[in-house]
Image (cartoon, rainbow, N blue to C red):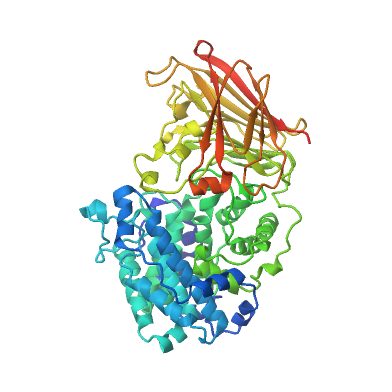
Amino acid sequence: MAIGTDAVEAPPLLTSWGSQAEAGSLVESLRGARDRLTIRPASDAGWQRVAACSLTKLRTQGKAEKGSPWPQPLVSHYARYFRDGNRTAYEELVASRQQRLTRAVVMAAVEGSDQAGWLDEVIDGAYLLCEQSSWSWAAHDDVFTRNGEVVPDRSRPYLDLGAGEVVAQLAWLDLVLGEQLDERAPGLRKRIRLEADQRVIRPFLDRLDWHWLGLNGDVHNWNPWIHSNIIVAALLLVDDPELQAQTVARCIEGLDRFLASIPADGAIDEGFAYWWNGAGRALEGLAVLEQATGGMLNVDLPVIRELVAFPYRMHLGHRWFLNVADGPARAPAGLPWDMLHRWAVRLGDSEAAHHAATFAAVEPEPEPWAGLGRVLTSLTQPGSSTARFEPSKRAQLRPSWGTYLPSVQIMIARQTPGATDGLTLAAKGGHNGEHHNHRDVGSVMVAMDGVPLLVDAGQPTYTAQTFGPDRYQIRAMQSAWHSVPAPFGLEQGTGSSFAATVLQEPTPEEPTLALGLGSAYGLDHAEQWIRTSMLNRELGTVMIDDRWNLPPAPAEGTPDVDITYLAAGTVRLGHDATATVTPDGIPNVETTRGVHLRWKPATAVVLVDEWHLDDPLLSGVWGEKLTRLRFRIPAETCASGAFTLTVETIDD
């Protein structure tokens, strides 16, 4: 009997595939699946083409570390999360171990014979993972909440993102190097299968209380990330056909819950950064299913088409993207753009295909941090070499005015349709119960020539506080440090009821988004604060207009009204209610042009706060600091009023 299918309406995969996706039918469909996957064993002739690719960085680092002691995550590192909230002490060591193993697998496959010792490197890394007490990350393990212990409970493995990544890595290396492992280290593959069964397959099938299953209707990026990794493990490490089919069928149901949760416009409320480890993982899992079944489980659904379009819809310019929730504004190197390109080509979305190809063309080589599966796919898929991508002379965008996604109330409007030139305005409504939520209802961002200058700080380094009850004590999460108003100095509330109301939707002819924001602050009704964000292409200006009619100040508030804007680069206050923001100080900027700010009423008091960035995730994007401009409306005039900020290009 299928589980959880009543939690969603019209599950798209099961509706499309019907009985073909049931365990009984999958037994036959999956016979020989291993031989149908496009990633092939190292003995396959296709690896000769891979050997000809430039793998300079991977090869150099692999040679430098080979033969040295492996990274050793210890219980003291694991325990730090429970003691002082530090996640990175353990997670960085685990990641280093897995990235080293990924490099070793690629080199062992590329070089063929083991004269250089790469196969022993793989054997040692794989065995260390089998010996590792927990495949879960400490931040996810429930050992402390269950019994107050900080040592992983080997008898009760926790199935999380970390466990999914480990089991998939072991599965892929088993496919690529299985024959060599049998010759060099008999028994290792048996051990890998035992660990996979005990740590992943059995917990997955025996327990239905994993929060990421989405059985309660709350479906987030863990769902496709873990399910897609388990599909790989089932296909490559489960030898019993009945058990294999049962596991894959359960994964299909899980992916169906994720796809059914996606709105019709394909928006991801976690934003561009988490798209890759949510929607992107779902696309990868679906591709593996299609290969494994010889095309029987193929997919062409409206929701997939919209998901494929999402990344380029969020593009500001160059490597900059609109970042909402926990995500950086600059895309890192190593994202699997080739995967997105294949989907876009398959679905006939030429804009998405061209956009993905532009990024794929400048990726020097796969990055081990992305995971062994993504590295192998990038290297071995037919035509996956980035040499086939033609770099564009300019970053390709959707050739239109911009985009509007009503499900998340996000507008992106461009001064020059289809290009990065000039001003780009992004405005967001939404609510404060979104996944990886920041209190950012009503926030705006403005980019010049594709580089954001009025910004969202993005994701700081995760700690125990990040997903705990004190999340909103973190500055980057607070509405006070987003470009939003603060009636009576109030912070926005937390939860889906603290939301924006759309009063005017944008159109290509009139790129204007008007929002009622009163409910985000717990005021009596939405229209007690109205924010209108608009782009005027003819004048080359962005205008954010705030108007309010407030009730008496609450006891927990202040008598004043603040309107906040967060700026990157260098801010200089001028005379007569003006300021400039230039990209000086932002690392690796692609433009020297800045913006000019004007505001009314000129009597607003301007308070300037500098945020000196000591978090490497933030400083790596923005440089040494961010600057907050707070425009304060005095108490005697703030019960009702208006404030307008105009942004325009600084003439060269």
Residue 148 location (% of width, % of height): 22, 52
Q: Is 474 rendered above or below residue 527?
A: below
Q: In the image as oriented, which residue stretches furthest toward the bottom?
A: 183
Q: 513 or 299, which is in the foreground?
A: 513
Work out which quarter of the rendered image holds the C terminus and state it: top right
Residue at 35% across, 67% down: 200
Residue 526 location (% of width, % of height): 49, 25
Residue at 70% across, 69% down: 387
Work out which quarter of the rendered image holds the N terminus and state it: bottom left
**Total marks drawn?**
0
Residue 136 location (% of width, % of height): 35, 61
Q: Is 259 rendered above or below residue 68?
A: above
Residue 201 location (% of width, % of height): 34, 69
Q: Is 212 rendered above or below residue 95?
A: above
Q: Is 637 rendered above or below residue 454?
A: above
- Asked whether residue 368 appears in the rendered view, the answer is yes
Residue at 50% across, 36% down: 440
- Asked whether residue 5 appears in the rendered view, the answer is no
Q: Quadrant of residue 140?
A: bottom left
Q: 214 or 392, which is in the foreground?
A: 392
Q: In the image as oriented, which residue stretches furthest toward the left?
A: 147
In screen coordinates, is 538 left or right of 284? Answer: right
In screen coordinates, is 569 left or right of 419? Answer: left
Q: 289 or 470, which is in the foreground?
A: 470
